[in-house]
Image (cartoon, grey):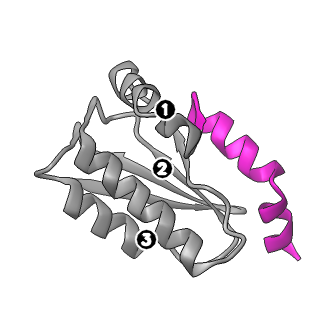
Amino acid sequence: MQLKIIDQPGCLYLKVQAERIDAAAAIQFKDLVRRALKPSLQRKIIDLEQVNFIDSTGLGALISLQKTQQNAQQNAPNLAICSLHPQVAKVFKLTRMDEVFDIYATAEAALKAASASPAFKADED
């Protein structure tokens, strides 16, 4: 598993380069993302376009990352997730994780939302 990290103005964009986030990959995924995250009000976007399977351990890793971010920074925005494969989107919907994370259809939509968010404006000052 690899993680492409792109520092964008006002957000940190992380593109997961793996087809699965399951029990075999969840710990590595969580460690890679945790190392990339910096405590700030900066928006974090995780692009799951290449991921076509996620199980409960993968969802648990995402929830853990969300909690870590919120514990590190009191007013930290939710993690944004984008570009979900239809099967992965179905898992998010069935488990109501679509209510926990900010979900965007495309990376472009997530980046646009990040640039318009109050956290983005606060980081520019």
Residue ID at (40%, 40%): 48
Horizontal and vertical percent position of residue 123? 79, 73
Kind of residue sitting beneath label 2: Ile
Q: Is residue 67 above or below residue 90?
A: below
| Vertical comparison of 4 with 105: above or below | below
Give x and y (percent) for residue 58. Answer: 28, 48
* Dots 3, 1 in contact, CB < 8 A: no
Read off the residue under disc 1.
83
Check if residue 119 falls in the magenta segment.
Answer: yes
**Mark 2 packing: few (<14 Cα in 10 Å), some, or many (20+)?**
many
User: Callout 1: few (<14), some (14-19), or many (20+) C-alpha neighbours within 10 Å?
Assistant: many
Q: CA distance from mark 3 to mark 1?
A: 20 Å
Which residue position is annotated with label 3? 36
Q: Which badge, 2 or 1, comes first in the chain's sequence?
A: 2
Which element carries disc 3, helix, strand or loop?
helix
What residue is rendered at 17% in x and 53% in y? Answer: 25
Which residue is more in the foreground, 53 or 12?
53
Q: Which residue is mark 2?
A: 46
Q: Position of residue 31 (x, y in %)?
A: 29, 69
In terms of secondary structure, where does tag 2 sit?
strand
Q: Is residue 52 above or below residue 81?
A: above
Left or right for 24, reference 54: left
Secondary structure mostly seen in magenta is helix
Going by the numbered disc 1, the residue's amino acid type is Ser
